[in-house]
Amino acid sequence: MKKSKAAVVHQQGGPFVIEDIEVQDPGPGEVLVRIAASGACHSDWHQVMGEIPKPFPAVLGHEGAGVVEELGQGVTRVSPGDSVMLSWFPACGTCFYCQREQHNMCETYRPFLESGTAMDGKSRLYLKGEPLTQFSTHSTFAEYAVVPEQACIPLDPEVSMESASLVGCAVMTGVGAAMYTAQIKPGETVAVFGCGGIGLNILQGAALCGAEMIVAIDTVPGKFESARAFGATHTINAKEDTLQALLDLTEGRGVDHVLDSTGNPKVQENAIYPLRRGGALTLVGVAPHDAKVTFDTFRMHHQETRVLGCFYGTGNCQRDFTRIIQLYKSGRLKLDELISRQSPLSEINEVYADMLAGKINRGVLTF
Ligand SMILES: [Zn+2]
Ligand SMILES: [Zn+2]
């Protein structure tokens, strides 16, 4: 058992409170990781606000990197001292979905994403003897995490923990959405709603895929400088007539792809209209769990509009995290530039305030 500082959320709406918690020893197939850095993702905030409903108290955080400290029984993938990136949705490699190359649908791990526990149905985190809800099978807003060994992806120790931590959610999700879910092709036209941590990664994923026109759309024009650095060729202030602006850019036809990173149902509902015939809308951002939208299905039939859900970038963490690091090392993907605030865990409430105000690309917490 380890004593660990952690950011605990006691009730819906927060705040995060720094507490001394107990982290249990790793069980069979589990690994104790000393967290070095954790990104502050909007999905954690959805859980704080009850939009992803889970019990409190909880320790959130799911975008982490660190160093392996102890192994449970039977662990073979990593050794103590290894640097690792953490995947909040590991894949077993052998289930129905993994055998069909749909690793992000792995049915071995799916129940524990929902339950907020380790794989035996119990928490590994306790506060004064009371169990704490985990985020997925781990919680990275704490000095230590106990995770399944499949959640650990070896990291080149030359890469900084702060940059590598973001691979675990924002980069895999955004770049994967462009590459694997939307499958953007060279020369295509792309519009991206929202220029936060996920949106910037969709932009750089679209650029990597060879898109010719990449349009970044946001209500905060202050984000457009970063958007251009991440691959946007055009920007539109969402307070203007976005549909008309996109039609004007494409000779009235519309774009090949729209990708939504906002998770805002109103944005999602209207996002089919800027598509050309045969175009695809990819829903990347997390909507509130009870959100519903209405689509114009007559138009979708006539225009062969496709609407695609995107979960964790349709990725395979064991393959793609390493691939992302290789692309970063060869200068083809940006990680360092995603970080616009780096702060100790004790400043987590301020980091989230900055994120909600649209002031930062990504905030990273350090330990
Ligand atoms: Zn996330
Ligand atoms: Zn599986």
Image (tube, grey):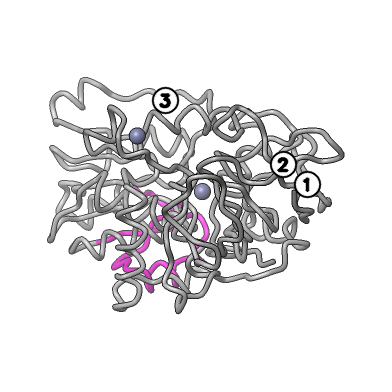
The residue beneath circle 2 is 125
> Which sits earlier in the primary sequence, circle 2 or circle 3?
2
The kind of secondary structure element at disc 2 is strand
Q: Are marks 1 and 2 in contact (CB under 8 Å)?
A: yes
Q: Nearer the viewer, mark 3 or mark 1?
A: 1
Q: Amino acid at mark 1?
A: Glu
- The residue lying furthest to the top in this view is 298
Q: Which mark is residue 232?
A: none
165 magenta-colored:
no
Looking at the image, residue 138 lies above or below residue 154: above
Q: Along the line of sight, which residue is nearer the eye, 333 or 248? A: 333
Q: Where 92 sits versus 290, above or below?
A: below
Q: How far separated are the C-alphas under marks 2 and 3?
A: 37 Å
Dividing the picture into quadrants, the one containing residue 36 is: bottom right
Residue 44: image quadrant is top right
Alpha-carbon span between mark 3 and mark 1: 42 Å
Quickly name the residue at label 3.
Answer: 293
| Image: magenta residue range | 214-242
Of the residues shown, which amino acid type is indicated by label 3?
Answer: Val
Query: Residue at the location (75% across, 53% down)?
Result: 2
Q: Which mark is residue 22?
A: 1
The answer to whether residue 229 is left or right of residue 51 is left
